[in-house]
Image (cartoon, rainbow, N blue to C red):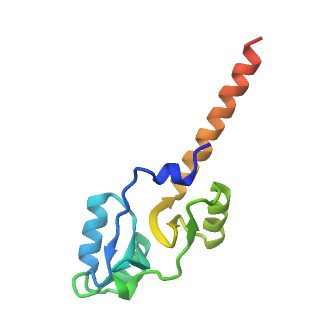
């Protein structure tokens, strides 16, 4: 069974620094193909900036993309899981918080971001494996 550690093993963590302009953050997110980036102050996690923050707190409020910094519009109510938590536990946290992304930490250090899509892929792979095992069992006689 694939674990959170397995998924994040070779995945780079894309972050932005506190004080970055919205324009820089959005350009960075677009270049990396991500919809959410953790915001760091030195090595410390202080928030996240997402496409939803951009729409609700920047565009809808007519804020300037160059003059506004992520600190002013980022989400600070963070949903966090430890790297050794079960997939089910992580999914439950995401469901309770009504979020599509969760930050993963290991020894108080940010090690990655998981999306709902990542967890769905794990579930689908587990189902596929179960079907294959059952198929082999049934048709091997």
Task: Indicate the quadrant where residue 83 lies.
Answer: bottom right
How far across and how far down the image is residue 19, in percent? 29, 85
* Residue in the picture at 45% in, 69% down: 110
- The outermost residue toward the front is 107
Task: Indicate the quadrant where residue 92 lies.
Answer: bottom right
Compared to residue 27, the image places residue 41 above or below, namely: below
* Residue in the picture at 36% in, 86% down: 71
Camera-side residue: 76 or 58? Answer: 76
Task: Say which quadrant the C terminus sits in.
Answer: top right
* Residue in the picture at 62% in, 42% down: 1
Give the number of callouts.
0
How far across and how far down the image is residue 117, in percent? 52, 53
Compared to residue 97, the image places residue 133 above or below, namely: above
Camera-side residue: 9 or 16? Answer: 9
How far across and how far down the image is residue 104, in percent? 51, 65
How far across and how far down the image is residue 43, in percent? 37, 77
Compared to residue 31, the image places residue 124 above or below, namely: above
Q: Please indicate whether residue 30 sits to the left or right of residue 46 in the image.
A: left
Q: Please indicate whether residue 44 sits to the left or right of residue 102 in the image.
A: left
* Residue in the picture at 32% in, 86% down: 62
- The outermost residue toward the top is 141
């Amino acid at each position: 069974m694939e674990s959170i550690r397995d998924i994040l093993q070779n995945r780079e963590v894309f972050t932005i620094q506190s004080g970055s302009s919205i324009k820089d953050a959005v350009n960075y997110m677009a270049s990396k193909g991500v919809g959410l980036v953790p915001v760091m102050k030195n090595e410390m996690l202080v928030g996240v900036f997402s496409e939803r923050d951009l729409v609700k707190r920047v565009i809808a409020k007519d804020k300037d993309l160059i003059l506004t910094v992520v600190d002013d519009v980022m989400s600070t109510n963070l949903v966090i899981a430890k790297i050794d938590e079960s997939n089910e536990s992580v999914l439950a946290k995401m469901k309770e918080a009504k979020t599509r992304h969760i930050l993963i930490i290991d020894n108080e250090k940010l090690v990655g971001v998981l999306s709902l899509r990542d967890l769905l892929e794990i579930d689908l792979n587990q189902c596929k494996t179960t079907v294959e095992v059952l198929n082999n069992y049934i048709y091997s006689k």
